[in-house]
Image: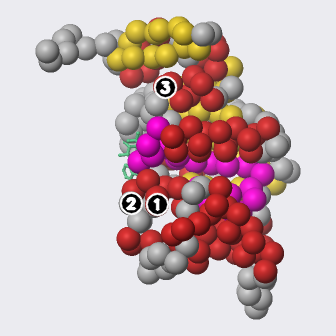
């Protein structure tokens, strides 16, 4: 589905680090973990073909993504960006319909089927009641759900999402992660930049650990999510609690709780 060969992401003034040779297959959920500035977003944008690598390549299907037309790429992969700014004045429905643009010729307009797909996506993300609202009036969480609805409307084979749980309350975090897991079950590949280790432990089957100096390692989640590796990654003491077969990670602090 998406492979990288000896990929070095281009972060100014940083040494090359570990060349990334990843194989993202249908049905897999990959979590990219690392501290602030490690390069998670840069890697995601490089996988999307939006950022040129320093060296190596990204192949989508059989083709080098950096040599594909954007429309062709957008017919296969969707990107959920970290910050969903206001862009230009548009309603929720107009915004989610952007997800259909890769499938519409420049001289055509959206069909009734496109509208139905868009409305289904809004419904799935609990946004139907807001379809006529201007996006400038949305809360942070509503805006995040709209970004995910727009990607869903695109019917991608591959999801690249930068901190998809940003701004979301607990119920919507579970809803979004379940939606992404359903997409993987339906044969999509899913790649997520995550700060929440517990979401990574619960939902991802593959993990990339990205270090600020460019070092990286990757593999099955069970092998990557260890206290030793994560403490080194974040330079932060952690503890792990296991409940009903599931691991939970907590940062340790010398401060005690206020009484
Ligand atoms: N145009 C640029 N010039 C110089 N440095 C840049 C530029 N763009 C990004 N960087 C640096 O590249 C590094 C990686 O940025 P990136 O956004 O990929 O990190 P991240 O792991 O996603 O971080 P966060 O967890 O804070 O979102 C950062 O140190 C950033 O400051």
Which badge, 1 or 3, comes first in the chain's sequence? 1
Distance from mark 3 CB to nearest ligand 1 atom below 8 Å: no
Residue 84 visible in the snapshot: yes
In the rendered image of this protein, does residue 53 appear above or below residue 95?
above
| Marks 2 and 1 close (CB-CB < 8 Å) | yes
Q: Nearer the viewer, residue 49 or 171?
A: 171
In the rendered image of this protein, does residue 8 appear above or below residue 86?
above
In the rendered image of this protein, does residue 191 appear above or below residue 17?
below
Residue located at (50% from left, 36% from top): 194
At which x and y percent is residue 95?
56, 73
Question: Magenta residues?
Answer: 147-170
**Residue situated furthest bottom in the rendering:** 107
At which x and y percent is residue 102?
73, 71
At which x and y percent is residue 20?
64, 33
In the picture, the quarter occupied by the C terminus is top left
Alpha carbon distance from label 3 to label 2: 25 Å
* Mark 2 lies on residue: 139
Mark drawn on residue 143 = 1
Alpha carbon distance from label 1 to label 3: 23 Å
């Amino acid at each position: 589905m998406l492979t990288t060969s000896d990929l070095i992401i281009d972060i100014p003034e940083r040494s090359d680090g570990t060349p990334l040779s990843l194989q993202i297959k249908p049905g897999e959920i990959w979590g990219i973990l690392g501290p602030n500035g490690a390069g998670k977003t840069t890697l995601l944008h490089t996988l999307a073909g939006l950022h040129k690598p320093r060296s190596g390549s990204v192949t989508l299907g059989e083709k080098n993504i950096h040599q594909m037309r954007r429309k062709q790429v957008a017919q296969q992969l969707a990107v959920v960006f970290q910050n969903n700014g206001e862009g230009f004045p548009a309603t929720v429905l107009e915004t989610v319909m952007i997800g259909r643009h890769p499938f519409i010729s420049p001289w055509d307009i959206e069909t009734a089927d496109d509208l139905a797909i868009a409305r289904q996506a809004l419904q799935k993300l609990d946004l139907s009641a807001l379809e006529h609202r201007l996006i400038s009036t949305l809360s942070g969480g509503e805006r995040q759900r709209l970004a995910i609805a727009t990607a869903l409307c695109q019917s991608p084979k591959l999801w690249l999402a930068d901190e998809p749980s940003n701004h979301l309350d607990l119920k919507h975090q579970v809803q979004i992660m379940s939606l992404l897991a359903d997409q993987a079950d339906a044969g999509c590949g899913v790649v997520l930049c995550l700060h929440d280790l517990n979401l990574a432990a619960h939902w991802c089957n593959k993990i990339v650990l990205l270090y600020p100096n460019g070092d990286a390692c990757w593999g099955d989640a069970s092998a990557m999510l260890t206290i030793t590796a994560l403490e080194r990654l974040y330079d932060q003491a952690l503890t792990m609690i296991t409940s009903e077969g599931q691991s939970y990670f907590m940062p340790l602090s010398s401060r005690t709780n206020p009484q």
